[in-house]
Image: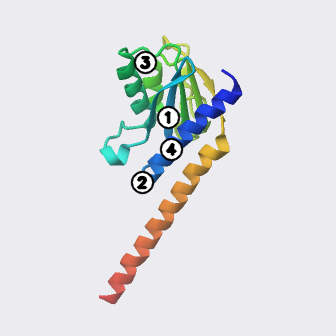
Amino acid sequence: MSAYNDEVFMKMAIDQAKKAGEAGEVPIGAVIVLNGEVISEAYNLRETKQSSIAHAEVLAIDEACRKLGTWRLEGAELYVTLEPCPMCAGAIMLSRVERVIYGAADPKGGCAGTFMNLLQDERFNHQSEVVSGVLEEACGSLLTEFFRELRARKKQERQLRQAGMELE
């Protein structure tokens, strides 16, 4: 796959991440491509579903498996805006995704080479090719802005609560 195609599909993952942000979710999006065709798209839905496993990657893998009628996603490429966590790396490995392309690194929990590298550990029976940093700035800025706004909103709520207590 060319770097150009990687950027095209990562832009689709960014569009999914934006949908997550609009829904009040952490803006992470994923797209799965097989033979140059998008077979699934998803975004983070942990808050909406109140489910710790409703990560974009897991939701996209589940949709792709249902669509293809198999749990094996051999030959598939997964584009995701944030480096996969341990759970998602496990799902990627178990579903046999061939390539993982991510935007922003996750130094606190990324399992595609930043914190650890589960996706290329030869002790497992499947390894994925990993491409990092595709549209990294765009992917990272979505997260940075989301958390900046979240902190500001929480600070404002705290101040309003404190002001309300002072008036009583």
| Left or right: 47, with 34 as reference point | left
Report the residue marked by disc 2.
24
Pick the front one: 5 or 100: 5
Q: Earlier in the sequence, mark 4 or mark 2?
A: 4
Q: Nearer the viewer, mark 3 or mark 4?
A: 4
Report the residue marked by disc 3.
94
Q: Earlier in the sequence, mark 2 or mark 3?
A: 2
Q: Earlier in the sequence, mark 1 or mark 4?
A: 4
At 65% from the left and 27% from the top, the residue drawn is: 5
| Left or right: 130, with 124 as reference point | right
Q: Amino acid at mark 2?
A: Gly
At 50% from the left and 31% from the top, the residue drawn is: 31
Report the residue marked by disc 1.
30
CA distance separating discs 1 and 3: 17 Å
Question: Given contact means CB atoms under 8 Å apart, are the residues at marks 2 and 3 in contact?
Answer: no
Please tell me whether mark 3 sits on a helix, a strand or a loop. helix
Q: Nearer the viewer, mark 1 or mark 3?
A: 1
